[in-house]
Image: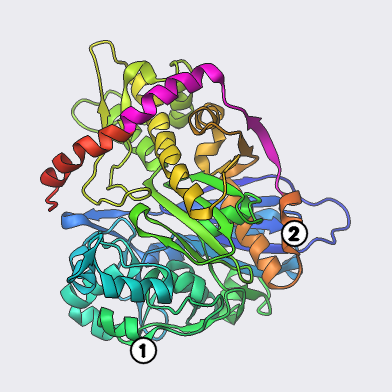
Amino acid sequence: MQSGAESSPNGPDSSRYVLALDLGGGSCKAAIVSDTGNVIATAEENIRTHLLPDGGAEQDPHEWWSGIRKAAKHVISQSGIDPEKIVAVGCDSQWSVVVPVNQKAEPLMNAIHWLDTRGGKYNRKIVGGFPRVEGYNLFKLQKWLRMTGMLPTKSGIDSLGHVLFIKNELPDIYTETYKFLEPMDYLTSRLTGKITATQKTMAIFTIVDNREWGSLSYADSLLRLAGVERDKFPELIPNNGVVGCLDANIAEELGLKSTTRVVAGIGDSNASTIGSGAVLDYEAIVYIGTSFYMNCHVPFKKTDIAHFIGSLPASFPNKYVMFAEQGTGGRCVEHFLKNLVYAEDGFSSEKKPEDAYERFNDMVEKIPAGSNGVVFLPWLNGSMAPVENPNMRGGFINISLNAKRGDLARSIMEGLAFNSRWTKQHAEKFTGQPINKFRFSGGGAQSGIWSQIHADILGVPVLQIDDPVNTTVRGTALNALVSLGLLDIQEIPNLIRIKKIYDPEPENRKMYNKLFPVFRNLYSKNRRIFNTLNNGD
């Protein structure tokens, strides 16, 4: 278990607190967060992703539930906060991850992860046909966009693709499934004993009627097109609703009151947007944790299918979150360190040290802008925004005899920032607004050099969030307080501290303006090659 604490209360304490539970791609975290946005204490448990043949990726929900409970018990004890003052529990999680459960909310198999592409062929089948636009039948495309603002992905990484994979290849599990849930709804169900979901958490299934914010209905016509039954999906409650109180047995185990309320779950990307202070329309963030995305709140439902950008219902009334999911983020760094630098194989001379990421950061700082000509392609599991292609892959380009590992390390940071610059162009068209600054959060935002690289490549100031690794749990807690009427949305920006503002450096901008078209060309010139290598069309 990893744990930490910022501060503990001294003297009379009139604050209210939230137990925020965060299920990320590589770990589950519990935190006690005050109504001033202070993260009092955290605890974390690692979780594993099992990569399988033919594009499979799964996680064990039993491991989630065990880790969440263990972390929650530890952090409640560690914080020293009176349980009476912990007024709510809020859950956020990775999304586009499907958990089939029975009537007791117990999982029937491993969860199908967002990296999983095994449902792609079934998605392509239900959306195909003539006349075709971007791989979609025109009439089906129009219906899906009108009803949901989204489309089943051709890669199958969305939740409907996962359900269709189970239906077609694991029919016994499909028959036995009482409800298909996203992870945040799975956790709230285990905490309360009530199986529910919301429009915002189920939107990625692309079968919920999103024509109005707050809809509690599934779209019958889309259920028929997908070939799935309505009763396989949970009851919908309001986006900013309360699921119920803690189950008495769970409350006793955690050391909380059984009257503690559990609010409706939220996606981690929505939570990190709130926790970064970007609650006003068009205030944009770049988040780099295990995953990698660009988000902002917008007042409309919209989809740009050509560039894999859309808007999902948010927690706040009549608000949507523009999401531009860019795929693997910090996992690119993790893969480099784990499999190339400190791989445990016949070439290894030492195990990965505790300070591996600090060493990585230090190496990058010593390398000039442009990585001495090395360019990194960041699509280790296919590209997403701004162009979806499950067959794209990563790589280091232009390695010479003079190339060093430091060049490769810096090129990883630059490659991800180049992808954000490419995405930014289409995000601005999507919103109809220029993006004049970004808030930078997630584990990647701990790095000052990565913050500077983003400012130089994006060409706008980058606001490095203070304590960026806790933006998601902070956002989950603030969302819970708003849902309970204990905090006003407009107060949130004043609760978020900015550690430092990074302005673009002109000399570095010259180098990156030269390299960005190269990055774009490397995508277009290699797309056919990657399609051939990875069984594409």
How are the colours assigned in the image?
rainbow
In the image, residue 72 lies at what x, y percent?
Answer: 57, 61
Going by the numbered disc 1, the residue's amino acid type is Asp
Q: Residue 516: within the magenta? A: yes
Q: Is 5 placed left or right of 533 in the picture?
A: right
In the image, residue 477 lies at what x, y percent?
Answer: 65, 61
Q: Residues within 10 Å of mark 2 (few under 14, many from 20)?
A: few
Range drawn in magenta: 496-519
In the image, residue 304 lies at what x, y percent?
Answer: 40, 58
Q: Quadrant of residue 319?
A: bottom right
Above or below: residue 335 compared with residue 172: above
Of residues 89 and 121, the one nearer the viewer is: 121
* Residue that protrudes farthest toward the front in the picture: 131
Could you tell me which residue is drawn at 44 percent across and 52 percent down? 324
Disc 2, SS: helix
Of residues 185 and 326, the one nearer the viewer is: 326
Could you tell me which residue is drawn at 75 percent across and 65 percent down? 487
> How far apart are labels 2 and 1 at the CA level?
38 Å
Could you tell me which residue is drawn at 66 percent across and 71 percent down? 256
Q: Residues within 10 Å of mark 1 (few under 14, many from 20)?
A: few
Above or below: residue 123 compared with residue 32: below
Going by the numbered disc 2, the residue's amino acid type is Gln
Residue 26 in view here: no
In the image, residue 169 lies at what x, y percent?
Answer: 16, 73
Disc on the earlier residue, 2 or 1: 1
The numbered dot on residue 490 is 2
Residue denoted by label 1: 231
